[in-house]
Image (tube, helix red, strand yellow):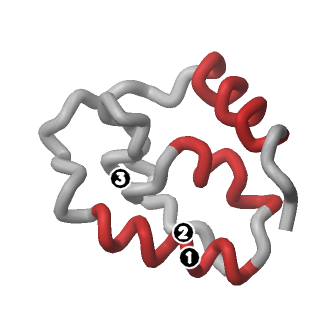
């Protein structure tokens, strides 16, 4: 399944991308996720679309945020 990334990355205060509407944990874990999980992520992202405004605070996804998300994901069971 293709990533929903639209190359307009920026995180709001709750760590949701204002481009694709995925949470940073979903972005970081995308490549390891099963197709079923990817489909679920896409559905959740579409549902969030109206909640995440492009005018909200945009923060570049920093290395520190990426590493923190990797650490959270590592603590979860892999499907």
Q: Seen in the image, is 70 located left or right of residue 56?
A: right
Task: List x then y, in percent, for residue 21.
Answer: 38, 56
Crowding at mark 3 (Cα within 10 Å: few <14, some 14-19, many 20+): some
Image quarter of the N terminus: bottom right
Q: Circle 2 — which element?
A: helix
Q: Where is mark 3, residue-wise?
A: 19
Q: Circle 1 — which element?
A: helix
Q: CA distance from mark 1 to mark 3?
A: 18 Å
Quadrant housing residue 49 = bottom left
Query: Considering only order in the chain, which callout, 3 or 1, is on the residue closer to the N terminus?
Result: 3
The reply to whether the C-beta atoms of the residues labelled 2 and 3 are less than 8 Å apart is no
Q: Where is mark 2, residue-wise?
A: 41
Q: CA distance from mark 2 to mark 1?
A: 4 Å
* Residue at (46% x, 55% y) in the render: 22
Quadrant housing residue 34 = bottom right
Task: List x then y, in percent, for residue 24.
Answer: 54, 42
Task: List x then y, in percent, for residue 5.
Answer: 50, 60
Q: Seen in the image, is 32 located left or right of residue 64?
A: right
Count of numbered labels shown in the rendering = 3
Residue 26, above or below 37: above
């Amino acid at each position: 399944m293709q990533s929903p990334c639209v190359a307009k990355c920026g995180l709001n205060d709750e760590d949701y991308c204002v481009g694709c509407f995925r949470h940073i944990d979903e972005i970081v874990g995308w490549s390891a996720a099963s197709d079923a999980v990817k489909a679920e992520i896409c559905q959740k992202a579409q549902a969030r679309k109206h909640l995440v405004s492009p005018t909200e605070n945009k923060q570049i996804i920093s290395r520190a945020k990426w590493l923190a998300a990797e650490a959270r994901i590592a603590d979860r069971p892999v499907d």
